[in-house]
Image (spheres, rainbow, N blue to C red):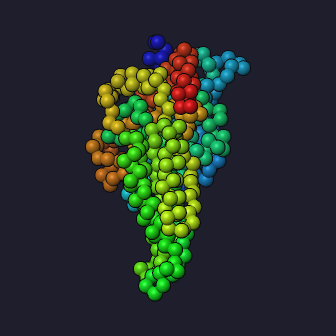
Amino acid sequence: MEKRQQMKAILQRCIDAHKDELHSLSRDIWSDPELAGNEKHAHDRLVRFFSQGDQTWTVQSNYKLPTAFRASWGPVGGGEGDPVLNVGFLCEYDALPGIGHACGHNLIAEVGAAAAVGLRAALESQTELSVPVKITVLGTPAEESLGGKIELINAGAFADIDLVFMAHPAQQDVSFQPCVTIEEMLVKYYGKACHAAAYPWEGVNALDAAVLAYNNISVLRQQLKPDWRLHGIIKHGGEKPNIIPAYTELEFYLRTPLLKELHDLKAKAEACFRAAAEATGCQVEIIYPTPACYNILPNATLTSLYESNGKDLGIHFPEQPASFCGSTDFGNVSFIVPGIHPFFYICTDALNHTEEYTKAAGAEKAQLYTLRTAKALSMTAVDLVCCPDLLKQVRDDFRLAKLKQK
């Protein structure tokens, strides 16, 4: 226990010593917001952060995706031939259209970088570690729209990582928030154009199909479970009032608390869309343009450790966190690697995805809370590095959570 406390004190001092550098990193990303998949400046800035100074990080830019990166350090400690414990920290850095970093992804990048730097300092302070430990930082772009982590999973980026840590800014500190499964659905109706006044009977009205479909979904909602969500828009409704629309398009999001429930909601929604096509004589095409983002698997041991470390740093966790229907591609990561994705307060009551939150994410007063969160994540990693029994509990929790999803 004494060694763990020494390591935790060292990582805290290290993060504090780098606070100006970390704030500059975050502020630079915040000042030049980039949309999903186009985060060139943020990518380059993070690569530069891990490439500067003592050059002890092995950095791979454009790692498997154009704006992803990987920075690795170690392994150190353990005995020859022992399996390496690879501890992963994730950085996000994409912004939102029109309002910049209104979800605070610049702070997510800072937390990941700070926690990794802190853990490295803690490990460097030890001459003996029971297992060889490696640190990997993954820059994961395009969370807001394209599901960059899912692409990285498919490309094998997480294959050698044993644990993953990241944290997301919000309105309060929450050690675990069960983000829900989400899938995007595009629905296209094909009819036949014709003069709407002269001979409408010759046309097949794709707008009628879209309107019926929208109403079908609205009626369906009263039969859905309270924690299911189904919402969308008509993206294209026609060209001119005197032309019967030959093409319309809708976009919907489907959300369920658990991945296994998504299939049922999709079947109900598809029935509504196909019924509208049948009623109007249109052809319908249903497309799922991006992979589903899964719900986050809970890990009781990681949550308990993070809360204990956070409380030691002065973090207050509400007994019953507010309900949340948001989604993240971290959920997919949590199905393949044990991990934790807490939320943290940044000294504002503003809501995410608002202009007010954009301002708060770039404010200096957010730094105390951001770096405190990074310390808590890094301290949790120290617990697992130093205590094989805790690591075993984390892995057991992971296996049990996966079984409950079936």
Q: Outermost residue toward the bottom? A: 198
* Residue 103 visible, this angle: no
- Residue at 27% x, 43% y: name it: 349
Count of numbered labels shown in the rendering = 0
Q: Position of residue 84 (x, y in %)?
A: 65, 25
Q: Position of residue 313 (x, y in %)?
A: 35, 26
Q: Position of residue 321 (x, y in %)?
A: 33, 33
Q: Nearer the viewer, residue 133 or 217?
A: 217
Does residue 333 sit above or below 277 in this rendering?
above
Q: Nearer the viewer, residue 121 or 386?
A: 386
- Residue at 56% x, 54% y: name it: 288
- Residue at 56% x, 18% y: name it: 392
Q: Nearer the viewer, residue 103 or 263?
A: 263
Q: Outermost residue toward the left? A: 349
* Residue 260 visible, this angle: yes
- Residue at 68% x, 19% y: name it: 82
Q: Nearer the viewer, residue 28 or 101?
A: 101
Does residue 263 sit above or below 214 in this rendering?
above
Does residue 221 sit above or below 171 in this rendering?
below
Q: Outermost residue toward the top? A: 1
Q: Where the C terminus falls, by quadrant?
A: top right
- The answer to whether 8 appears left or right of 192 in the picture is left
Q: Position of residue 227 (x, y in %)?
A: 39, 40
